[in-house]
Image (spheres, rainbow, N blue to C red):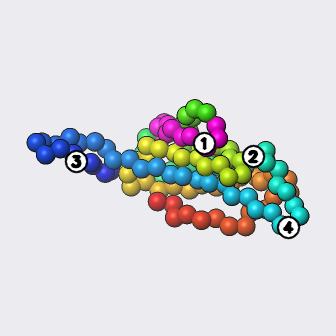
């Protein structure tokens, strides 16, 4: 668990948190046009010591309104070029994002990220 120290006349202690950004990139062969409304489902899994199994985390998705919540093991959807940002993740935790069943006609070709 991280601790953040602020102030010079004492100490303000807060639990440090992290965030995660996931962007969906879709490319097509020459002459093909991907469906701009195709939705891709991502599963969010968090691991680490002392995690609250009932904790919820806020996230936003570019191009949509409002903040949503997700729990460990939950899913969210993205369209081409959208980015989800999940905030408030416990310091020292690690994550896994798994793209679940792709829409018909799509294949997965690469994954980038380090999971921390």
Label 1 sits on a secondary structure element that is: strand
Query: How far apart are labels 1 and 4 at the CA level?
Result: 28 Å
Judge the density around disc 3: few (<14), some (14-19), many (≥20) Cα neighbours within 10 Å: few
Q: Earlier in the sequence, mark 3 or mark 4?
A: 3
According to the picture, the residue beneath numbered tag 3 turns out to be: 5
Give the Cα separation between the discs numbered 4 and 2. Answer: 22 Å
Looking at the rendered structure, which numbered label has been put on residue 70? none
Instruction: Give the labeled residue for mark 4.
Output: 30
Name the residue beneath numbered marker 2: 39
Give the magenta-colored segment's residue range: 53-64
Q: Which residue is mark 1?
A: 61
Q: Residue at x 51, y 55 (%)?
A: 95
Image quadrant in which you'd find residue 28: bottom right
Q: Classify mark 4: residues with Cα within 10 Å, few (<14), some (14-19) or many (20+).
A: few
Q: Is residue 68 visible?
A: yes
Q: CA distance from mark 3 to mark 4?
A: 53 Å
Q: How many marks?
A: 4
Evaluate if marks 3 and 2 touch, with contact meaning CB atoms under 8 Å apart.
Answer: no
Local secondary structure at mark 4:
loop
Rendering coords of residue 41 (x, y %): 70, 47
Q: Position of residue 37 (x, y in %)?
A: 79, 44
Closest to the camera, between mark 1 and mark 2, is 1
Residue at position x 62%, y 54% from top?
A: 23
Question: Between residues 63 and 79, which one lies in front from this camera angle?
Answer: 63
Disc 4 to disc 2: CB gap under 8 Å:
no
Front residue of 9 and 103:
9
């Amino acid at each position: 668990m991280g601790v953040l120290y602020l102030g010079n006349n004492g100490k303000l202690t807060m639990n440090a948190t992290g965030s995660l950004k996931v962007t969906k990139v879709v490319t097509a062969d020459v002459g093909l046009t991907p469906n701009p409304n195709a939705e891709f489902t991502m599963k969010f899994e968090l691991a680490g010591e002392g995690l609250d199994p009932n904790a919820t985390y806020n996230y936003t998705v570019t191009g949509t309104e409002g903040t949503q919540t997700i729990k460990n093991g939950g899913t969210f959807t993205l369209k081409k070029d959208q980015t989800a940002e999940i905030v408030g993740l416990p310091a020292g935790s690690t994550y896994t994002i798994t793209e679940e069943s792709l829409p018909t006609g799509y294949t997965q070709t690469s994954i980038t990220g380090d999971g921390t």
